[in-house]
Amino acid sequence: MPKKQAPKNYNTAAMQPDEINALRALVKEFVGKIESVDNEIELLKNDRKEIIEEYTEKLDFKTLQAALKVAKIQSEVVHRDTFDLFMEVLSDPAQH
């Protein structure tokens, strides 16, 4: 999701509530939402760690991670034919 940016010369402080109780409620709402997201992130990190531990003994995990990185890079390449040519040139043993 792209970040929303305030226009230049936009004074956010002037838009927030002046009354302390309204400001307190708004800050409490914000902090609650951030804490909720942070908790979900921690749960997902733990789930990810458990999955990795489960498959570490079943797969050559370092090689798999390298392959996943390459696959991600390849999926993002716009000019696939040119990329493939570069890869062929770079992997040619005569060139090393």
Image (cartoon, grey):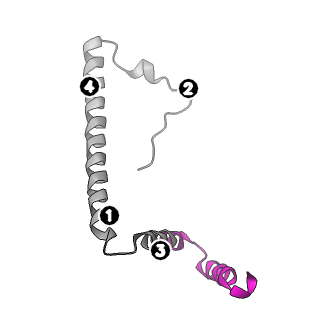
Q: Secondary structure at mark 1?
A: helix
Asked if residue 23 lies in the magenta stretch, the reply is no
Q: Identify the amino acid type marked 4.
A: Lys
Look at the image and give the residue range highlighted in magenta.
Answer: 72-96
Counting residues from the start of the chain, the first of labels 3 and 1 encountered is: 1
Q: Looking at the rendering, which quadrant does residue 16 occupy?
A: top left
Mark 2 neighbour density, 10 Å: few (under 14) some (14–19) many (20 or more): few
Which amino acid type is shown beneath numbered disc 2?
A: Asn
* Main SS of residues in magenta: helix
In the image, farthest residue toward the right = 95
Residue type pointed to by label 1: Ile
Q: CA distance from mark 4 to mark 1?
A: 36 Å
Residue linked to disc 3:
67
Give the numbered dot on residue 52. 1
Residue under the point 49% across and 68% down: 69
Horizontally, residue 21 falls left or right of residue 69, namely left
**Which class describes the residues within 10 Å of circle 4: few (<14), some (14-19), or many (20+)?**
few
Which label belongs to residue 28?
A: 4
Front: mark 3 or 1 = 1
- Which sits earlier in the primary sequence, circle 2 or circle 1? 2
Q: Which quadrant of the view contains residue 86? A: bottom right
In the rendering, which numbered label is found on residue 9? 2
Q: CA distance from mark 2 to mark 4?
A: 27 Å
Is 94 rendered above or below residue 72? below
